[in-house]
Amino acid sequence: MDSESAESTESSESTRSGESTQATVIRGACPHDCPDTCGFLTTVEGGRAVDLRGDPDHPITQGALCVKVENYLTRVYSPDRVLYPMRRVGAKGEGKFERISWDDALGEIGARFRTIIAEDGAQAILPYSYMGVEGILNGLTSGDPFFNRLGASIGERTFCASGVLTGYIMTVGLTPGTDPESIVNSRYIIIWACNVISTNLHLWPTIAEARRRGAKVVVIDPLRSRTAQRADWHIPIRPATDGALAMGLINVLIEEDLIDHDYVAKYTVGFDELSERARKFTPTYVAEITGVPAEDIRKLAREYASAQPSVIRFGVGLERQPGGGNAVRAVCCLPALVGAWRHSGGGLVGGATPFAFPFKWDVLQRPDFIRPGTRVVNQYQLGAALTGELGLDPPIKAIFIYNTNPVVVCPDQGAIVEGLKREDLFTVVSEQFITDTADFADIVLPATTQLEQFDLMFSTGHFHMAANNPAIAPIGEAVSNSELFRRLAATMGFEDECFRMNDEETARAAVDWSAPVLDGITFESLKRDGHARLRIGEIDDYIPHAEGNFPTPSGKTEFVSSAAAGGNFVIPLFRQGSLEFQPGDSIDPLPDYVAPGESAAGSNLAMRYPLNLISPKSHAFLSSGYGNFARQQRVAGEASVTIHPDDAAPRGISDTQAVRVFNDRGSFVAVARVSPAVQPGVVAAPVGHWRKFSRSGSTVGATTPPAFADLGRAPTFSYNRVEIEAV
């Protein structure tokens, strides 16, 4: 690497020798699946990283890192890191391994893959990955060219945001949406199904500044989260009823004539049909469904319409219910109805900013390698895929897992564990630590941390592109994902050019450097400066839909979706190449409230399991990342479940008591937190705690359902019926 492009030096004093030495500061970027994509600076002395801090010059980071990564060097230099290839020596699940060489590891993987291909075909091999790294070189798509070339089954990734983006695109198109930084100009901010302080921390100062200027902050969430506690108004809502509330707001806006008629006439389609659909969603009717008082529904609609600019920052929590996709569609109708898109700081913020980054996903994924007829296995159904419940032919005989810890983050934990215990299943895990998933591996491969690899980073929460320059050499024999798949390609005899390109060559090829949004930004300048804002205009000037210009077939906000009638589109990252989303004629062209099955009081399911368990992200963990670190464990506390006093009392449950949470799928033991932070009938257990550190050898994933939501094959984590009993 060109040292001048990535490094700066500063003098430091050596306390051992008394001699002056040089400390090098390297510009990097956080690797995690978080909207903030922070810039950080790593100080290196004698080849060792001695300090890591937030980049004060990064407009989003502003020098501050979150509780998850502020002690990142502890992760890098942890004595528990996987630093060498290892082979299992105990029973599956015991986590006992012996060190082997890279040649032995690659040789065994290659031999097993060739045997499986000869006996069952390449589709008996399943790649399994997600967003443990968000970079374009080592992230979600890093193994796609290899596995597509191999002919393996395609692992469809719809865990997070697929449902949100499906509903979003059907309504407003593939638009990056409102600049999150422009929220500083907002006068009414609705945070819907998103705990910003825990999962999008660096947006909070922008919201706080908007509030200082007079904005009102409203949070819609079943849980009184950290963000809800800081809001001006928290609106608790029953889980899985967000679509009803959004339709209720549409009803009030129309019935009370609070809409921007000029904007609706010029820049929307389907208003008459939407009006008719919304007619039945009166505040009284919606209050019965959502638990939100009718007068609060009216008040919210009135304030949202009158206080412009108004913005809705919605989170992926919206999709995690049976009707999640339709809920998003209804929410996405609201800004056009009130003309919020006319203003800087008005509109929608919902994780769509990656659409502005000019990455060539076909270069990164190589869908041209996919053989016609290759089957798709959705990763959300891993348990059923491994246990044979899906009836796959051929069955999965090998699984290659990287960038994720499915035993913790996937639903139906018991089935996943049962499947991973199969003696006929060859499991390879690339990891930094022996996670709950790595415990079941036959081969474990050592993965680098962000300080040891090069990458280019996009963001789901702002318009700043970043370069992560490696600060130190890989420790032990750890390799980046990009290098791992180059080695695997060589092992399998693949000679395609993409497998011979180094990281910088791939990065240059995978970006359209001539795109207008990169005007004046080069590969070299990005490495040198660490980050750059896309050339989309100044924050106050970027108002993409003041005059419509939505990237939909009509060019308008589509209350009646043309995509629902059979239009096709690809959501980058989630589906590859020709694996297009095809809603088809069965999709309602209008948004609606889709009630969860057997949700009514007195139904069979509700009688057996009367509590609705939601599983929000932990404040201290990144999904399951950092779940093995003492500092983050102290912040998170022991695995817990929050229950309302009205539900705790009849069950004989007291605060801090151990309780068993269970349903037909499984159970886990946690500490009860008796609190009005949830409504009666709702309980909350954060996801991310590791199975091996739990009291019961299971976590919240043991109870979560593997069912899909209505759109995008999104998860349904937030509609999970359970019962709780004292242990």
Image (cartoon, rainbow, N blue to C red):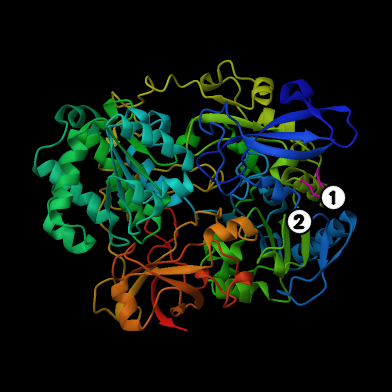
In terms of depth relative to the viewer, which is nearer, 227 or 332? 227
Spatial CA span between label 1 and label 2: 10 Å
Examine the rendering and report whether any part of residue 153 can be seen: no
Residue 476 numbered tag: 1
How far from the left and from the top, in percent, is residue 42? Answer: 70, 35
Along the viewing direction, whichever of 16 and 162 lies nearer the viewer: 16
Q: Residue at x 76, y 20 (%)?
A: 4
Q: Which residues are magenta?
A: 474-479
Mark number for residue 285? Answer: none
Label located before the other in sequence (1 or 2): 2
Q: Relative to 175, does residue 103 appear above or below in the rendering?
A: below
Most distant residue in the left direction? 256
Q: In the figure, is residue 297 to the left or right of 424?
A: left
Label pair 1/2, CB-CB below 8 angstroms: yes
Q: Is residue 196 above or below residue 707?
A: above
Q: Is residue 17 left or right of residue 78?
A: right
Dot 2: element = loop
Task: Indicate the quadrant where residue 155 lies.
Answer: bottom right
Residue drawn 31% across the image and 31% down it: 186
